Image (cartoon, rainbow, N blue to C red):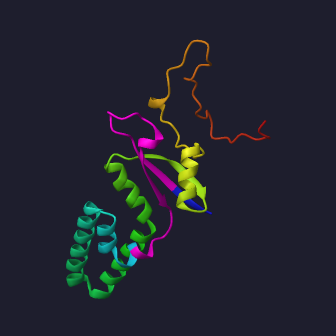
Amino acid sequence: MSLFAIYAKPAAPDLPQTLANEEVEVIKDRFSIFACLLTPIWCVWHKLWLELVAYVGVAFVLGFVAFFVGESASAWVGFLVAVLIGLEASSIRGYALQRKGYLFKGGVLAQSARDAEWCYVAGQLDQPTKKASETPPSTSDQAPTNISTTLLSNERPSGAIQ
């Protein structure tokens, strides 16, 4: 099983806000050898223009540094940058989708991207935690939510949790 990140772009305002009208992208969270070895081609393939400009800038800086520091040190730094890009390829694609208006809907463990999309449609995602500003205001019949949970001392609690 693999971990997949689900990103969805809401439907246009003139269309009904249903799953059928959303654009859904499923990204497998894994190391990308293609992004590691052929970063410029990978960026063009996925239409990551800002990331391509950043990569060319980093390559230019590494070439400039190689002139002063030495080619072997610059080659090792370039290798580390390539490995980092390979490791973070799925996150880079996710950030690019968020810039294009997609929303992160959650993660799911599935056998394939198709199964992950089915889990999204069925509503079986691990939802991201909501921020305090997104929670609805409390009413008078609910327990108060402004109780502080900070520790009063440095002692750790002991005993079993019940």
Taking the spot 47% from the left edge, 41% from the top edge, the residue there is 19
Q: Position of residue 58 (x, y in %)?
A: 26, 71
Residue 80 visible from this viewpoint: no
Taking the spot 67% from the left edge, 41% from the top edge, the residue there is 155
Task: Give the number of marks.
Answer: 0
Q: Quadrant of the C terminus?
A: top right
70 sits to left or right of 22: left
Name the image quarter holding residue 14: top left
Q: Position of residue 43 (x, y in %)?
A: 31, 68
Q: Height in image: 141 above or below 75?
A: above
Q: Quadrant of the N terminus?
A: bottom right
Q: Give whichever of 30, 119 is nearer the camera.
A: 119
Taking the spot 53% from the left edge, 40% from the top edge, the residue there is 129
Range of magenta residues: 5-34
Q: Height in image: 12 above or below 148?
A: below
Q: Give whichever of 105, 67 is nearer the camera.
A: 105
103 sits to left or right of 152: left
Q: Position of residue 38 (x, y in %)?
A: 34, 77
